[in-house]
Amino acid sequence: MRPDLLTPLFGRVATIPGIGEKTAKLINKIFVTPRSQSSEARIVDILFNLPINIIDRSQRVLISEANIDTIVVIKVIIVEYKISQFKNKQIPLRVIVRDDSGELDLLFFRANPDWIMKSLPIGSTRWISGKIEKYDRRLQIVHPDRMLDEDAFLRLPLIEPVYRLT
């Protein structure tokens, strides 16, 4: 028998202010399984939904100092676009970026060139976050996680939790 103080934690998720039936159905898809004791998600299910991993964006380095296969945050200047003249979607759109120590390629497969050029105008300074790799003796980030201007960068958390189904 549990104490009466804990009873509200075993209530339906839909009873939380701001969560209606529509949102509760989506939450039920995450927490209710054939093995569940309840047919609806409970408040306690959400409270104990802990992160399964973290993304550490605290490594802010120059391009030349970046460790391969790690997530980094680099302040760069957009130098040039390399867009294939062919309509082959297997050829990535390549954005060349630079900092004081070297160059790096940002690769985008199946990307909309207009959106890339709007997000990363030539000559602008951006903070890029993603996993840095080496291919054909060149450093690259394929589909960067974040491409931020100075204002958005100031709001970027150093440690980002990763939850199930996100």
Image (spheres, rainbow, N blue to C red):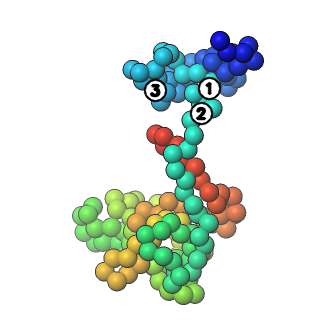
Question: Which mark, residue 103?
Answer: none
Is residue 115 in view from this perspective?
A: yes
Q: Which residue is mark 2?
A: 48
Cα distance between the residues tagged 1 and 2:
6 Å
| 145 in relation to 65, above or below | above
The quadrant holding residue 16 is top right
Element under disc 1 = helix
Q: Which residue is mark 3?
A: 29
Circle nearer the N terminus (2, 3):
3
| 118 in relation to 12, above or below | below
Q: Residues within 10 Å of mark 2 (few under 14, many from 20)?
A: few
Circle nearer the N terminus (1, 3):
3
On-image quarter of the N terminus? top right
Element under disc 2 = loop
Mark 1 vs 2: CB contact within 8 A:
yes
Is residue 87 in view from this perspective?
A: no
| Camera-side mark, 2 or 3 | 2
